[in-house]
Image (spheres, rainbow, N blue to C red):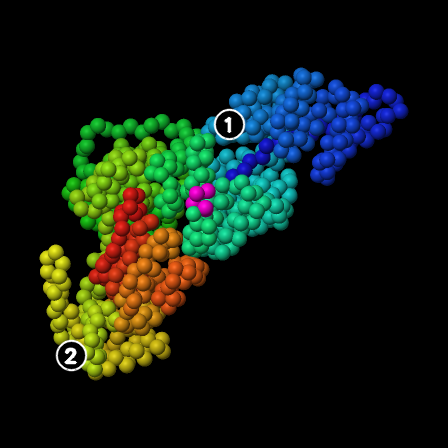
């Protein structure tokens, strides 16, 4: 977010040396200001230089000439010229203020601060110096001092649009979004063509989940100033968050064309290209991205790569941890303005251990799909469970189950103040507070920064370190986080005995524990994943159909016998016709069987995984255009987890297994063409890679039965998706790397 630094021009009339030149001298001085307003830089410089020929010791003309140099980017020349103006007129607050601007531009922040203070000693009500000094204080993390200075500037000059906008951005940083909005609106009232205020107000509205309002603000900012790179970048972020990746890419590229040195836009563009598997100039892009992060960390700036994205790039472990730490420090800065004294905790545990789970994902979200039964499975004789929701009730059974089975369920989405939320947690006497968001959407890490509990831990929702001094442990396991890699983490490692990762599939999808293989009596070959039938109760089908049991022994380290139930039908035509025609159901020997593609039409709660399907459901390769006789490799992750090396390894497998296909998801759809084009360049025909649409949760899990092997993404493994596939009995082949996300 940019804030406004004010450069001051002083209109001056120059007293002539010769009476005959008075009109030309006056005209020269006026032309200097007028031509600058018209952006005729060369003429402005020439006019000021002519004025100085007439009046060499005129401090104001030197000051205005320095302003033109500053706007041209000639910072050293501007500094020298400002100093000349000050030498000529020591009592010149405008010149001191502008000199400070130039010094700050050069990175000489201490000298700039001193120059602003001199201006304020000369003129305590110098509004521009108050505003610009506040900008420095804000950058240094002195938010309260910055706020005081902005308010002082507005007290001196209530119609100061830039100060309103800057104050609004500080209020936004503190989470005071409604107050920020009021000051942005005031800035725009004063200056209706204030593009920066529109753009920054869009950021506030975006944070308030008002996407339409944010979009309107960014669009207006661009209408006012089509060359406003930051507004184009902000507009891109709206497109990106809305899933309109092509539009986001276009807007980021526009921003970079307007401002080539724009790290935020470059790194966000890189992430968008990763999402759609556009690997044009991939190596050069990664090299530049790493260089950007290195430079930002070296200069103690907030990196343009988000912690959650850092695992996708060839960054060092130390870089990833430092990126997370910088974001954690932002949380500390936000809570400092609350002036809350540290919470006090008793030294002895009395009664049961109180555990608090904090998450924005208590609802229809992969996190709840994994852990919704956990609150109710704790031993209430030993522990007391509190669940703190950071999001409103979405009306799903996931939310209902957690709120019902947790001993205490508190909706903190109605408590937007982090200080008050932390007070509530502390008042509940929580002993161990569990952060299930990390740096994912909806997180409120400021609550943890206030330390309302004596022990605070990371678990499940975020696959990496918090980098935060206020997080004590990360719950993990010896495979995911071996001691040899503990330096990646700012937290202490708390090992679970087997795995930290859990799933609720036993409760959500019990109908997938057993299946009946569909076979045509005229077909001598038998495959266990071409056409399958699932249900919680298969007895109606078993009793009305010729079902036999087939046994086979799998030769592993220890031989394992597997039993398959096979329904031998006189013909599979009814099933094939149902699928081809899009019918919802058909009848097999008088038993109704539902088309596996139609679950959203028959029971939406069963489709989302909120209820267990009660119908008998058939799933076939025909439904997804998969060859019956092929080896089907699959991966159901979002496409951003694929990198060129991963696709190359998959292509190599396809080349070595001729009768095989790779099954991926349009996740997002715009990535399909890029994957297909790259695979063809690697020597694989388009028909060897088959894409399907993203499906509702139950179908998404159930169709995993049709694959032979799931090939994991080494860059960032499948987490919930791997659990989904494993529940259907399909094996996953993975390649562990070193990050938590890749193990």
Q: State which region is magenta.
A: 284-288
Residue visible at 24% across and 37% down in the picture: 484
Q: Earlier in the sequence, mark 1 or mark 2?
A: 1
Q: Residue at x 46, y 50 (%)?
A: 281
Q: Residue 628's spot in the image, x, y percent?
A: 28, 72
> Closest to the observer: 197 or 184?
197
Near-viewer residue (32 or 587): 32
Residue 521 percent location from the top left of the image = 19, 81
User: Is residue 528 in view from this perspective?
Assistant: yes
Q: How many marks?
A: 2
Residue count near mark 2 (Cα–Cα under 10 Å), binned few <14, some 14–19, many ≥20: few
| Dot label at residue 482 | none
Q: Which residue is mark 2?
A: 546
Please give left or right for residue 329 compared with residue 722 in the image. Answer: right
Residue 58's quadrant in the figure? top right
Q: Does residue 41 belong to the magenta stretch?
A: no
Q: Quadrant of residue 327?
A: top left
Q: Which residue is mark 1?
A: 137
Q: Is residue 495 left or right of residue 648?
A: left
Disc 2 is placed on an element classified as loop
Q: Are marks 1 and 2 in contact (CB under 8 Å)?
A: no
Q: Nearer the viewer, residue 95 or 73?
A: 73
User: Which is in the foreground here, disc 1 or disc 2?
Assistant: 2
* Vertical comparison of 597 with 51: above or below: below
The residue located at (34%, 60%) in the rendering is 651
Residue 582, image x and y in percent? 36, 75
Image spot of residue 330 (x, y percent): 42, 35
Residue at x 29%, y 40% (from the top left corner): 458
């Amino acid at each position: 977010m940019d804030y406004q630094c004010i450069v001051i021009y002083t209109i001056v009339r120059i007293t002539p040396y010769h009476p005959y030149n008075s009109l030309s001298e006056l005209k020269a001085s006026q032309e200097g200001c007028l031509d600058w307003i018209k952006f005729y830089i060369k003429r402005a410089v020439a006019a000021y230089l002519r004025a100085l020929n007439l009046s060499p010791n005129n401090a104001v003309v030197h000051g205005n000439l320095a302003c033109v140099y500053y706007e041209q980017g000639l910072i050293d020349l501007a500094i020298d010229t400002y100093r000349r103006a000050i030498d000529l007129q020591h009592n010149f607050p405008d010149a001191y203020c502008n000199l400070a601007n130039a010094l700050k531009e050069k990175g000489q922040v201490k000298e700039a601060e001193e120059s602003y203070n001199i201006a304020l000693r000369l003129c305590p009500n110098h509004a521009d110096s108050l505003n610009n000094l506040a900008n420095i204080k804000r950058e240094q993390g002195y938010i309260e001092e910055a706020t005081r200075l902005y308010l002082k500037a507005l007290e001196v000059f209530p119609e100061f649009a830039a100060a309103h906008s800057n104050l609004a951005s500080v209020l936004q940083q503190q989470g005071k979004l409604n107050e920020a909005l009021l000051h942005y609106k005031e800035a725009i009232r004063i200056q209706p063509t204030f593009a920066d205020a529109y753009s920054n107000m869009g950021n506030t509205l975006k944070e308030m989940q008002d996407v339409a309002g944010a979009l309107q603000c960014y669009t207006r900012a661009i209408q006012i100033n089509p060359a406003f790179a930051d507004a184009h970048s902000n507009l891109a972020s709206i497109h990106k968050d809305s899933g309109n990746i092509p539009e986001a890419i276009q807007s980021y590229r526009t921003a970079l064309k307007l401002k080539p040195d724009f790290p935020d836009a470059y790194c966000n563009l890189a992430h968008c290209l990763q999402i759609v598997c556009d690997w044009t100039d991939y190596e050069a892009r990664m090299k530049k991205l790493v260089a950007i992060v290195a430079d930002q960390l070296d200069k103690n700036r907030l990196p343009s790569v988000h912690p959650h994205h850092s695992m996708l790039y060839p960054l060092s472990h130390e870089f990833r941890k430092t990126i997370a730490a910088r974001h954690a420090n932002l949380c500390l800065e936000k809570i400092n303005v609350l002036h809350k004294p540290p919470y006090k905790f008793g030294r002895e545990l009395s009664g049961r251990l109180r555990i608090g789970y904090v998450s924005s994902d208590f609802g229809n979200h992969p996190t709840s799909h994994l852990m919704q039964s956990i609150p109710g499975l704790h031993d209430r004789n030993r522990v007391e469970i509190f669940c703190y929701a950071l999001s409103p009730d979405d009306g799903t059974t996931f939310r209902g189950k957690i709120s019902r089975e947790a001993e205490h369920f508190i909706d903190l989405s109605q408590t937007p103040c982090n200080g008050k939320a932390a007070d509530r947690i502390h008042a509940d006497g929580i002993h161990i507070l569990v952060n299930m968001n990390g740096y994912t959407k909806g997180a409120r890490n400021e609550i943890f920064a206030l330390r309302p509990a004596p022990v605070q831990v990371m678990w499940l929702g975020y696959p990496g370190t918090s980098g935060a001094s206020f997080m004590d442990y990360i719950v993990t396991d010896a495979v995911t986080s071996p001691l040899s890699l503990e330096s990646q983490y700012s937290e202490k490692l708390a090992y679970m005995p087997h795995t930290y990762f859990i799933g609720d599939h036993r409760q959500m999808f019990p109908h997938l524990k057993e299946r009946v293989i569909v076979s045509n009596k005229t077909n001598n070959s038998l495959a266990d994943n071409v056409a399958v039938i699932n249900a919680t109760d298969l007895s109606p089908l078993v009793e009305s159909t010729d079902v036999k049991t087939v046994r086979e022994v799998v030769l592993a380290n220890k031989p394992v016998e597997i039993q398959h139930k096979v329904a031998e039908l006189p013909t599979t035509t009814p099933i094939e016709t149902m699928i081809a025609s899009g019918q919802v159901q058909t009848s097999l020997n008088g038993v109704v069987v539902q088309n596996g593609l139609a679950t959203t039409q028959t029971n939406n709660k069963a489709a989302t995984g909120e209820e267990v399907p009660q119908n008998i459901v058939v799933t076939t390769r025909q439904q997804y255009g998969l060859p019956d006789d092929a080896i089907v490799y699959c991966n159901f992750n979002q496409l951003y987890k694929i990198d060129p090396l991963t696709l190359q390894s998959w292509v190599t497998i396809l080349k070595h297994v001729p009768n095989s296909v790779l099954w991926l998801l349009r996740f997002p759809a715009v990535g399909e063409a890029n994957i297909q084009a790259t695979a063809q360049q690697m020597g694989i025909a388009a028909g060897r890679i088959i894409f399907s649409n993203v499906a509702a949760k139950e179908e998404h899990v159930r169709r995993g039965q049709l694959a032979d092997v799931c090939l994991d993404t080494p860059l960032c493994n499948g987490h919930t998706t791997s659990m989904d596939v494993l529940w259907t009995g399909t094996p996953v082949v993975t390649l562990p790397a070193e990050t938590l996300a890749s193990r």
